Amino acid sequence: MRDHIQFYLGDQHYRLSDVAPETTVLDWLRETRHLTGTKEGCNEGDCGACTVLVVRLENNQLVWKAVNACIQFLWMLDGAQLFTVENLRSPDGSLHPVQQAMVDLHGSQCGFCTPGFVMSMVAYSKKAGATAKDADINDALAGNLCRCTGYAPIVKAMKQALQHTQDNFEREQDQIRTRLTALQNAEMAEIRTHAGTVTLPRTSDQLAASYKAAPDATLVAGATDVGLWVTKRLQSLPHVISVSGVHDLRKIDHRPEGLWIGAGIPYTEAQQDIAALFPDAGEVIRRIGSTQVRNAGTVCGNIGNGSPIGDGPPLFIAAGAILHLRHGETRRTLPLEKYFLAYGQQDRKEGEFIEGILIPYPAPALQYRAYKVSKRFDQDISAILGAFALTVTQAGLIADARIAFGGMAAIPKRASATEAALVGKMWDERALSAARDAIQTDFAPLSDMRGSEWYRRTVAANLLTRYFAETSGMTQQPETRLAGWKETAHG
Ligand SMILES: Cc1cc2nc3c(=O)[nH]c(=O)nc-3n(C[C@H](O)[C@H](O)[C@H](O)COP(=O)(O)OP(=O)(O)OC[C@H]3O[C@@H](n4cnc5c(N)ncnc54)[C@H](O)[C@@H]3O)c2cc1C
Ligand code: FES
Ligand code: FES
C-alpha cells in the first residue's frame, strides 16, 4: 500500500505523504508554494478565478481539463500534471498565444479574473473539435466571470488564439506523456496524518472493502459538492475515500440493456453519450455549472448528494434509470426514483456506495423532453426541472408516462397523479388540461429564494403545456426554445 501521492506541478515532481483530507489545490498553491497567480474569488466554484489546468493520461491519451482549484483537493492530483498561469510563459520569455491575444485585443482591465480566463482558454484550445463559434466559446468560458472588461474582447482573443496550433504544451507533449506514464501506479494509497486519512482505492473491490470497514468516511468523487462543505461550511473531513481514482468505475459502456455510467464518470465525459439518446438531457447537462464544474463533477455524485434540485435525478428518473449499489460483496439495484426517501435521506446503507447507473435505450415511440428553469441561463442551479417521457402510439394514445420534477418537493420525484391522468388517454387538449390539474395534487412545493410556491406550481403546469406544444403534433407549433439552443444542442 502506498503512503503518498505523486504528481507534477509544471515540470516539478512532488511526492507527498503529508496531505490533509481538506487541503485544496488552491490553498496549497497560494499558501504553501506561494504561487499567487491563481486567484481566489468566490472559493465555491462559481467565478473561475482559480482555474488551473490538469492533464492526465487516460487510455494512452493526454486529457486536458480546466478545473476550479478552490474545490479540488490536493490528493486528487495523484497521477496528474498540474499547470497554473505561472507555467504559460515560454522559456524565451514570450507569452502563450492565449495571453498574447488577451494583450492584443484588450481582454484584461483590473486583471483579477485574467489568470482564470487564460487557463480556461488554454484548456479550450486543447479540446478536440474546439470551434471558433460564439456559442461554443461562450460555453467554454461560462464558468469565468469578469466584472470590468466585458466578454466581447475576451471572446475575440479566444478566436485569435485558436489560430495558433502550437504552444509549449504541444511541443512538450512527449515529455508530458513520459512523466505521466511514470506516475501511473496501480497500487492503492492510504495517507494517514494528524489531520486525517485519505484513502485512494484503485479498484471497486478495494473501495467496497475500505468503505465497509470505515462507513463514517466521506466518499468523494469530483468534490464539486464536498469541496464546498470545506470552503463554505468550514467542515472538517477526518477520513475521505476517493471514488474518482477507481479504474473500473471510470467506465461508460453501451450495454445491451442500456447506457452504463460508472460512478467515476464526470459530466463532460457522459454528455455526448447521454445527448445521443436523449438530446434534451444532453442540453440540460450542458447547463450544469460550468465547464470546470462538469469536468470534475460526476453524474453519480449528483445522485449521491440527494439534493432536491440536482439536475441529473429528474432527467434519469424520467428515462427509467436503474441505480446500482454495492456494499462489501453484496450488490443490489433499484429504480432511481426509489433511492430518494425524504429530504437528506436516501436508500443507502452505511458503507454502501453507488457503482453506477444504467439508462435504458429509448424506444422509438418515446417522446422525451427536459426543461431546466433557472434565473440565469448558464452556471445556475435550477428553480425547477421537469423531465417528461410519454410513449404515444401511432394512433395518438398515451401508452406509458414517466414524468419527474426537481425543485417541486423535498426530493426529486415522479408526478404519479399526472402520469395516471394521462395513461390510456389520447394526447390532446383534454388530456393536457387533466394533467395540468393533476400536477397540482402531485406536489406541495416550498417558497424559497429561487421561487415561490405559486411560481413553482405555475411553471410546472406551464412546462406540461410546453411539452404538449412540442410533442402533440400541433399544426402551428409556437417557438418554445431560446435562440442558440438549436445551434448548440442539435448542431
Ligand atoms: C459552481 C457550481 C455549480 C453547480 N451547478 C450545478 C447545476 O447546475 N446542477 C446540478 O445539479 N448541480 C450543480 N452543482 C452541484 C454539483 O456539481 C453536482 O451535484 C455534481 O454532480 C456532484 O458530483 P461530484 O462528483 O462533484 O460529487 P462529490 O462532491 O464528490 O460528492 C457529492 C455527494 O455524493 C456522495 N458520493 C459521491 N460519490 C458517491 C458514490 N459513488 N456513492 C455514494 N455516494 C457518493 C458524496 O459523499 C457526497 O455526499 C454545482 C456545483 C458548483 C460548485
Ligand atoms: S475562487 Fe471562484 S471558482 Fe474558485
Ligand atoms: S478584468 Fe477585472 S474582473 Fe475581469
Image (tube, helix red, strand yellow):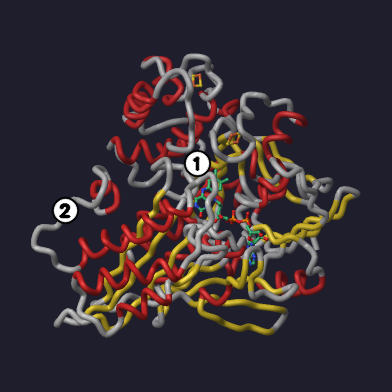
Residue 62 visible to the viewer = no
Classify the position of the N terminus by image quarter.
bottom right
Ligand 2 image position (quadrant) = top right
Can you tell me whether the CB of the residue at mark 2 lies under 8 Å from the nearest atom of ligand 1? no
What's the amino acid at mark 1? Answer: Gln
Task: Give left or right: position of 109 versus 346.
Answer: left
x 37%, y 74%: residue: 418
Using the image as rendered, state which of residue 369 and residue 424 is in the foreground. Answer: 424
Say which label, 2 or 1, has the lower sequence index. Answer: 1
- Residue, disc 2: 478
Label 2 residue SS:
loop
Residue 319 visible to the viewer = yes
| Whether residue 393 is situated above or below residue 158 in the rendered picture | below
Q: Mark 2 to mark 1: distance in Å? A: 51 Å
Disc 1: CA contacts within 10 A as few (<14), some (14-19) or many (>=20): few
Residue 349 percent coordinates (x, y): 71, 76
The part of the image, by quadrant, that contains residue 228 is top right
x 38%, y 25%: residue: 151
Residue 332 percent coordinates (x, y): 61, 83
What's the amino acid at mark 2? Answer: Pro
Task: Give left or right: position of 31 versus 374.
Answer: right
Q: Which mark is residue 173?
A: 1
The residue mark sitting in front, 2 or 1, is: 2
| Whether residue 42 is situated above or below residue 226 in the rendered picture | above
Q: Which mark is residue 424?
A: none
